[in-house]
Image: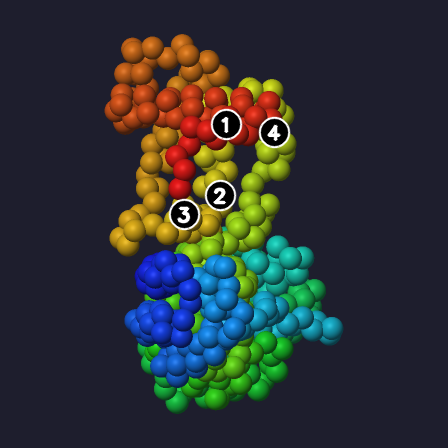
Amino acid sequence: MFETLSQKLEAAFRKLRGQGKITEKNVAESLREVRRALLDADVNLGVAKEFIEKVQKQAVGQNVLTSITPGQQIIRIIHREMVALLGESKADIAESHDPPTVILIAGLQGSGKTTFAAKLARFLKSKGRNPLLAAADVHRPAAVDQLVSLGKLAEIPVYSESGTDAVQIAAHSLDSARKNARDTVIIDTAGRMHIDEAMMQEVARIRDAVSPHEVLFVVDSMTGQDAVNTAKAFHDLLSIDGVVLTKLDGDARGGAALSIRSVVQKPIKFIGVGEKLDALEPFHPDRIASRILGMGDIVTLVEKAQERVDQEKAVRLGKKLRKSQFSLEDFLDQLQEVKKMGPLEQVAGMIPGLNRIPAGAKVDEKAMGRAEAIIQSMTREERSRPAIINGSRRKRIAAGSGTSVQEVNRLLKQFEDMQKMMKKLSKGNFRKAFSGLPSR
């Protein structure tokens, strides 16, 4: 997410950090690099120009010029302005005092509307709401079947009819929600490959029929500037309440995220960060700005851990660590818990420092799978007492896991080093525990 933009901004900041004193000249030079990075990321020209002007106005102030760490001051200003550009604070989804709350989903075909509808239903269910999905896309072949399948996966009912009147289906879904005590209706509407009058008028008629409390426009973030233009067209007709950016996990540029709110003056409410139903995040402007500027996003990482990590296992592990009883069985458990938090690249991108990987470099997801296979090829006794794993056992484990003896040796060495660190930590000797680690 935003890898290319982050790397180009980092290069611009590196020049500033090397300056003993900030002057108008080197501020201007660095901000030219920032402007170029924004435009390369497909940020709207007017948005980029206004952003740079605001940063420059603050950056040449006396407080910055006399700062002990001027480079950090500039970055702080850019972070603050980027948060303002993205929307200041998280925008919550509407909730009506007179149920059901009606949420209308609109957007072009291929933007991920149907999948988002199911993700949103699952998200709201996890927050204690009782949603119903409504299949009002009667034009795309198999759209209803897709929503029904996703509804089953999310364990959420889907209202559908055999007819082709999308307005009628949407209206009837509200009646169904009231009869079945569903407090939220999420209506999936039809999209087209491009904006056309028939599509826009149908969505407008559905809106008029159901009077939604929330109209969300779903857009593929990888379309860049086109996403902004499409959002504006939908907003002019429907008066949308918020934007959803899908496929942000594959967007290395970030132009849509940085432009769209400023152009349509409506908040980004959610971002899609993967294909699975749980790969949906509420949009936090401050956290996204931190990710773009290479500061990580520890808060979201902790939230993911709290939601998906088995808390009982975590307590048991804590007790074992205090007693220096960490085994390969526990190591396997931890690998599996980390996998629940999402792709390793996403997890690494939330940790300050780890997101500054070279362009084109990838986090090796397969390495974790190989480590799991190696441990699973061991006997229970070998997992609890790795010291007994001799040469013949290593050959057997390598053959059983489809790896090499060298990989088995590497894993055992890593585990041995980890055990030593855990032992030192359990005794409270933090300095010794980390003394062997390379310094940055």
Give the labeled residue for mark 2: 340
Foreground: disc 3 or disc 1: 1
Q: Amino acid at mark 1?
A: Ala
Q: Is residue 136 left or right of residue 19?
A: right
Which one is in front, 27 or 277?
27
Name the spot of residue 115 as percent of width and height, x first.
45, 63
Q: Considering only vertical position in the picture, is 340 above or below 173? A: above
Q: Is residue 93 left or right of residue 39?
A: right
Name the spot of residue 214 as percent of width and height, x first.
59, 76
Residues at marks 4 and 3, CA–CA distance in whole angstroms: 25 Å
Q: Amino acid at mark 2?
A: Lys
Give the labeled residue for mark 3: 354
> What's the residue at 66%, 61% (across, down)?
129
Q: Residue furthest right?
A: 97
Q: Amino acid at mark 3?
A: Leu
Which secondary structure, mark 1? helix
Give the labeled residue for mark 1: 433
> What's the residue at 57%, 71% (across, down)?
88
Residue 168 lies in what quarter of the image?
bottom right
Give the labeled residue for mark 4: 318
Residues at marks 3 and 2, CA–CA distance in whole angstroms: 19 Å
